[in-house]
Amino acid sequence: MDNLEENSLFKKKKRKLHTYEKAWLNYKHIQEEKEKRKQFIEETLKFKHFFEYMRLKYCYSFTPRLCEKYFCQMSSELKFNCNDAINSGTDFELNHQKRQKLENDEETRKIIKAEPTETVRIKRYKYAMFLAYRGKNYHGMQVNPNVPTVEKYIMEALQKLNLITVDQMVQPSSFKFQRAARTDKGVSATKQICSLLLPTIEGKENDTVNLLNGLLPDDIRIFGLQRATKSFDSKKWCDSRSYSYTLPSYCFRHQSDLERDKFRLDNKDIEDINRILMQYVGTHNFYNFTSGKLHKDESCKRFIIRCECGKRFLYNNIEYLTVDIKGQSFLIHQIRKMIGFCVSLIRGDLDPCLQQKVWQNERIKVPKAPSLGLVLEEPHYEHYNKRFQATHQRLCWDIYQEKCDEFKQAYIIKDILETDESEKIFEEWLTYLTEKFWNDVDDVSIVGHSDNV
């Protein structure tokens, strides 16, 4: 009997203990749930503040400082910092009515208006710009500080039409601006192509071109804007470049020949000139036809496709000759020195044996012809046109040819002839060669020293 009572009592105590244990576990579970709920609420508030901050930032262009001022105005009791809201999840809930009231408040509107807004990203596309210019009034194509250049006027016109920003105008690389060929001071271009990123102007290309031309000087003309591939770069995709050099025929006469007004080149003279010009065709080291480079510099090697005499014509009883040159790329002053070297050989100022010696590592004294007669005729894009002919319009000048010819005759050729007539550019250059250039050193054919010395 006693054993039964003891067993019954033990069972009661055991059940009671089990009940206490169960109650304790339930209590712990409830506490854990409360803690989780608390954390969830804190995280929710954190993201509430974050989204509110983002709403102010992107919808109203609020800066972080202005956001802080905004939240402090809403609640004088709680100084809310937007950075703390993002990082630590401050227990602060915005009141919808107060927020609406504050957004409509005049003082807040004044603050919003006073604060500078952030730049809005605009979708831009790659375009090819077809243009021509007379180089007489400019210090080259590329932007140079404190001097007028062709690109400077183009940048200003693009900025005035809001096609680029003020910052982009100062830094052309920021909108991928590139030119097919860089021309020096005084050098003109009949056909030039530039690549750049612009906001979409699809269907408004002609209107945009007319507006740009209205902001540009008369001796810079844009003929067209054409959509190109995303990877298009007018310099890298250019296969070759064609130039021409126009000069009076009397530049090739000997000292004992007729007066310049009566001098004319005959077929034999043209053959002699072409024979020298043909020496340039092919791949050569043009170390002696540029400046600031050594003979061993690989960048001195250039490939010339064609170099020959072009048309002859009369202007005020003076005969002029045009030399046509086409090459893959050119060094600075290369073409002008090629013309100067040819003129010096025909006139007898240089020994004919230098035609082969000029490619070696000895420094040869080569005169530089005036910049007046040099013209960029056209950059060529055969490979680009062939590769993207199925998806993009060809980079072709056919539709602009008539306008290009009119501009060339009115501004470039006419300027070369009139400037030479009034300022005697080529006559003074020949005088300089005879009286000073070839008399500066004892040995007029070779100066300097070998790279191997």
Image (cartoon, grey):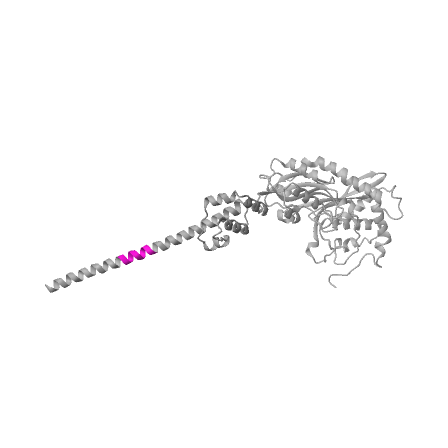
> Could you tell me which residue is drawn at 77 percent across and 37 percent down?
410
Residue 21 in sight:
yes
277 w.r.t. 16: above or below: above
Identify the main secondary structure in magenta: helix
Q: Position of residue 250 (x, y in %)?
A: 85, 44
Quadrant (top left/top right/bottom left/bottom right) for the C terminus: bottom right
x and y, in percent, of residue 60 in the image:
54, 45
Residue 42 sits inside the magenta stretch: no
Q: Can residue 265 be seen in this view?
A: no
- Residue at horizontal 40%, vertical 51%? 41
Location of residue 172 in the rendering, given as x and y in whole percent from the top left corner: 65, 48
Q: Which of 94 and 413 is in front in this view?
A: 94
Residue appearing at x 27%, y 57% in the figure: 23
Is 396 in front, or is 409? 409
Q: In which quarter of the image is the N terminus?
A: bottom left
Q: What stretch is highlighted in magenta?
A: 23-31
**Total number of numbered discs in the rendering:** 0
The front one of 351 and 39 is 39
